[in-house]
Amino acid sequence: GSGTVLDMHGFENRKTAVWRALERRIIPKLEGLLTKENVDKAGNKSKVIRPPMVLALMKLFQKFPEDFFESKLPHILTVICDSLRNRDSDIRDVARSTMAKIATGMDLKYLADVMRELMITLNEGYKLHVRSATVHSILQELQLHYTPSPAGHGDDSTVSSFDTALPAIMEII
């Protein structure tokens, strides 16, 4: 589509040296920068996400063909969800805010994937409350960014995309 860095037409047949360098060297290095190691006062190590890196990488991946974006999305969601499992509430707050920005920054058709990853990762104990708070943050952020078109006017792809995510949302609630 428009706005992609590499045109889908003939994409597989024209993997250039630039694309190979991106795919094999640059993107893996960037993915390695999504988190940094943090040591708390008690000496415990944990991984903390770097929101600017996560958001920038998502924006970059959205410029590539959809199948590439869809192959990278699960890893990014997993990295954020791993931070949501952290016992430190400040780290969780940053991850929650990042997840809400990610969810609103991409097509609504991926919202169900976000909800599924939250269900898988945050599935017991205190994580259930973290999951509820994260879903709440995502829905609040979506409310600020998406407004359905008036009934009978224009394209309702936003509504139908949101509707496809409703079963996953309801399963969490």
Image (tube, helix red, strand yellow):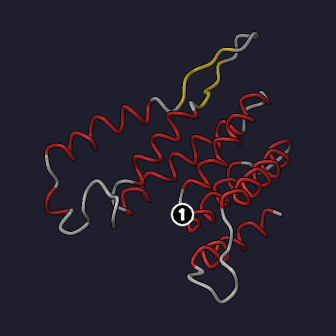
Q: Which residue is mark 1?
A: 107
In the rendered image, the vertical position of residue 85 relative to residue 44, given as above or below: below
Task: Kindly indicate the quadrant of the structure image that contains residue 3.
Answer: bottom left
In the rendered image, the vertical position of residue 45 relative to residue 164, given as above or below: above
Task: Kindly indicate the quadrant of the structure image that contains residue 152.
Answer: bottom right
- Residue 161: x and y in percent read 60, 74
Q: Is residue 21 left or right of residue 31?
A: left
How many numbered marks are there?
A: 1
Q: Is residue 97 left or right of residue 19?
A: right
* Badge 1 element: loop
In the rendered image, the vertical position of residue 49 relative to residue 160, given as above or below: above
Pick the front one: 160 or 119: 160
Q: Residues within 10 Å of mark 1 (few under 14, many from 20)?
A: few
* Residue at 36% from the left image edge and 31% from the top image edge: 29
In the rendered image, the vertical position of residue 116 relative to residue 55, given as above or below: below
Q: Is residue 9 left or right of residue 87?
A: left
Q: Amino acid at mark 1?
A: Asp
Q: Give the quadrant of the C terminus.
A: bottom right
* Residue at 32% from the left image edge and 58% from the top image edge: 4
* Residue at 52% from the left image edge and 45% from the top image edge: 76
Pick the front one: 147 or 129: 147
- Residue 26: x and y in percent read 30, 35
Q: Give the quadrant of the N terminus.
A: bottom left
- Residue 82: x and y in percent read 64, 39
